[in-house]
Image (cartoon, rainbow, N blue to C red):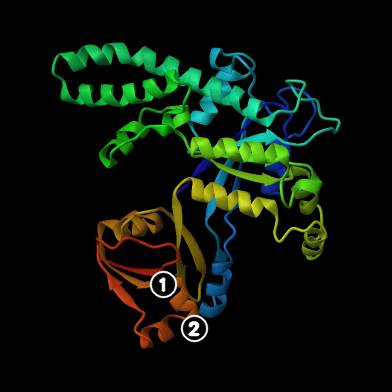
Amino acid sequence: MGFKCGIVGLPNIGKSTLFNAMTQTVSAESANYMFSTVQPNIGDVAVPDARLDKLAVIAKSAKIVPTRITFVDIAGLVRGASKGEGLGNQFLANIRESDAIVHVLRCFEGGDVTHVEERIDPVSDAEIVDTELMLADLESLERRITPLEKRAKTGDKEAAALYGLMMKALDLLREGKPARQAVLTPEEFEPYRQLGLLTQKPVLYVCNVDESSAANGNVQSERVTAMAKTQGAGAVAISARIEEELTQLPPGDRNEYLEGLGLAEPGLNRLIRAGYDLLGLITFFTAGPKEARAWTVEKGARAPRAASVIHSDFEKGFIRAETIAYDDYVAFNGEAGAREAGKFRLEGKEYVVRDGDVLHFRFNV
């Protein structure tokens, strides 16, 4: 199953540098001029998970297959994008196709890179992008709401329910708040998502800091973190320049380089995990002699849904899920040991998959 995070932000704040480092490619042109990214660059990124390596050792797996997320480097946005300024229409269309938004903000002073607003203020930068997205959502909803209201007044129950959802979003947007802050019942989540609102998508703010601030952030990244908390969004501080330099080093030299900077791991590992969490996803595993593999499923998914991630036939003919918790699999050195210790379980259709479960599905088609 594919999940796509759109990398957005003003021009010249480090989006393409970050994308290049994340995907360890040079496919995204990084340059000091407006709209160096015109067509979106797309890259699949492995989600780092040390658990998978441990499972592979225990299961003596010939191959390791991590789960992945797609990142899209989208053209820089400017004021007026909601009205088509710059590459606004294209920018908004690319975001609409993404499951979540990774919003990169410049949190470093100096350098030879020109800031489009001629000042360093990441909170104001965020407000520019957020405002354009809210304006685009407002225009979209106001265009749709009038004919829907007429249908609702005729007694059309479906139209009335959809009208109520649209009004929830409109009320927030008119107050200058993103649509994702709406209070919804469980039954409303899916129809609300289908409204296709840009500001309904979850957001992770990425603070692009200088090298000296990579370990602990700085004043600017602290401001962004505080702003993110008020919005229910996430925030992480990394140095795109460090991440880019890491990709140019031999693998054996990278840990020493990170230690010298006071970093325990690449910032991109934290960013990717945060993006994975942002989408409300968990990982389950399959492990055997052929391969150890990580799979992605939504939090709260039941066993048949998890089975469908591997193959749709598994869900149709689902019988049982052979289940071992990750900690038990490791503690008892694999499936045989877990069975002997009574940690092997057979779960049915109502079982809610837990992060780290090692599963084998029984099915009949």
Bin the neighbour count of mark 2 within 10 Å (Cα to Cα): few under 14, some 14-19, many 20 and up: some
Q: Which residue, given by chain and number where applicable, does mark 1 sit on? A: 325
Query: At which x and y percent is residue 31?
Result: 79, 30
Res. 313 image quadrant: bottom left
Q: Is residue 147 above or below residue 175?
A: above
Q: Position of residue 199 (x, y in %)?
A: 47, 29
For marks 1 and 2, give the CA distance: 12 Å
Residue 281 vs 102, above or below: the answer is below
Horizontal side of 135 relative to 262 (left or right) equals left
Answer above or below: position of 112 versus 322: above
Please say whether residue 300 is visible from this viewpoint.
Answer: yes
Q: Residue at x 50, y 35 (%)?
A: 231
Q: Which residue is pictured at 70% across the width and 24% down the height? A: 35
> Which residue does the numbered mark 2 point to in the structure image?
333
Q: Position of residue 57 (x, y in %)?
A: 57, 77
Q: Image quadrant of residue 239? A: top right
Q: Residue at x 66, y 41 (%)?
A: 222
Q: Is residue 337 above or below residue 360?
A: below
Question: Which numbered disc covers residue 60?
Answer: none
Element type where label 1 sits in the image: loop
Q: Residue at x 36, y 61 (%)?
A: 353
Which residue is more in the foreground, 52 or 162?
A: 162
Residue type, numbered disc 2: Asn
Check disc 1 and give the amino acid type: Ala
Give the secondary structure at mark 2.
loop
The mark total stands at 2
